[in-house]
Image: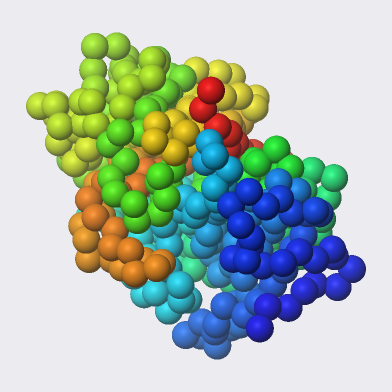
Amino acid sequence: MKKALPHLPLIASLLTLTPMTHAADPSITSKSFGTTTGGQKVVQYTLTNDKGASVAVINYGGIVTSLKVPDRNGKFTDVVLGFKTLADYEKKSPYFGCLVGRYGNRIANGEFTLDGTTYHLARNNNGQSLHGGLKGFDKVVWNATPVVTKQGPSLKLTYSSNDGEEGYPGKLTVTATYTLTNRNELKLVFRAKTDKATIVNLTHHSYFNLAGQGNGDILDHVVTIHADKYTPVDDVLIPTGKLAPVKGTPFDFRKPTTIGARINDADGQLKNGKGYDHNWVADKLPGHLGMIAKVEEPKSGRVMEVISTEPGVQFYSGNFLDGTIIGKGGKVYHFRNAFCFEPQHFPDSPNHRNFPSTVLRPGETYKNTIIYRFAKAN
């Protein structure tokens, strides 16, 4: 049964709301989401803002299991892919909705050198290290503290990653705060500190379909990316080290363009990624909060803006979804049925001196803010 947290206002379950119903007050409710194979209990927290939008987050992997936002007519629909059960997230999730770390994206050959010492990581993706290794932050149980703030309902997650965990140096203490603001923003604030020099690159990995999860492909979604350059990759998706101009290529989204407009062009980079699976160099100052991308789904009128402090963003067009995954509501997730926008530092940054540094040292604080803002098309 769903259990209301103490000292917090209550609302009815979102399942009982009619499409135009608005919640009177922001709230947080919680319920059990099962037990991991290691015996740890997992809780799902549902944050609902004063507009009636809601996000459900489990403390296993910081995973967003549901995100319900309105269309142009005020109808709420879940716009992120995912599963109904913890077992499915443990066994077969392609990083649905998770908090990625210690290092989001890929590190070549699973190794990097820092201050003269070479560190070896798990090679869990075609000989490369991907998304923190075999048991990254997406596969651990986080401590969770819910609170309703002036901005909206919020969930604070904390985790301490021991020195040497997954091969990374330093004890890393991480805080991730999820807030569903009353402006219909999912705001993620990441902070981390270390006791030894290390590398950090945290991000969020929801698979979005603004027409609704499982409701067809995303090729008609209209995308704008504020970037003049991107980082080309080799055939195992490791950056070559170049910062290439998007002008004259299928990677030019400086003007609104549908995802499907050029995704099947005869282009070597599209072949390497089986579509879009690349990092764009954000056209803004690193560390400063700014607009990176915008996505509009024409039929529903839903708009998502991506705002971040990060220097880059990985745009992924769901190329490895192949119809073998059955998600929420029995929906089958087929080829290109979702997209990801993952604000981040560049892939394989520790092995490219010309990329922004991902090194964190004792006494410093890693800071990263990501905002997914939802609105209606004009």
- Looking at the image, which residue is at 53% across and 59% down? 66
Task: Check the image and name the residue furthest to the left.
Answer: 266
The image shows residue 102 at horizontal and vertical percentages of 52, 54
The reply, left or right, for residue 343 in relation to residue 6 is left
Q: Residue at x 66, y 83 (%)?
A: 1
Q: Residue at x 46, y 72 (%)?
A: 84
Q: Is residue 278 left or right of residue 282?
A: left
Examine the rendering and report whether any part of residue 206 can be seen. Answer: no
x, y percentage for residue 159? Answer: 65, 64
Q: Is residue 280 above or below residue 119?
A: above
Please give the count of numbered marks on the rendered protein: 0
Residue toward you, 110 or 290: 290
Q: Quadrant of residue 153?
A: bottom right
Percent x, y of residue 118: 42, 50
The answer to which image quadrant residue 7 occupies is bottom right
Task: Note whether residue 69 is visible.
Answer: yes
Query: Eyeballing the image, is 27 above or below 3?
Result: above
Foreground residue, 177 or 376? 376
The extreme right residue here reads 7
Residue 41, placed above or below residue 308 = below
Pick whichever, 277 or 295, lies toward us: 295
Question: Residue at 31% of width from left, 27% of height from top?
Answer: 258
Q: How is the image coloured?
A: rainbow
| Residue 265 versus residue 333 in the image, above or below | above
Front residue (pair 126, 84): 84
Residue 2 percent location from the top left of the image: 68, 78
Which residue of the protein is positioned furthest toward the bottom in this rendering?
Answer: 39
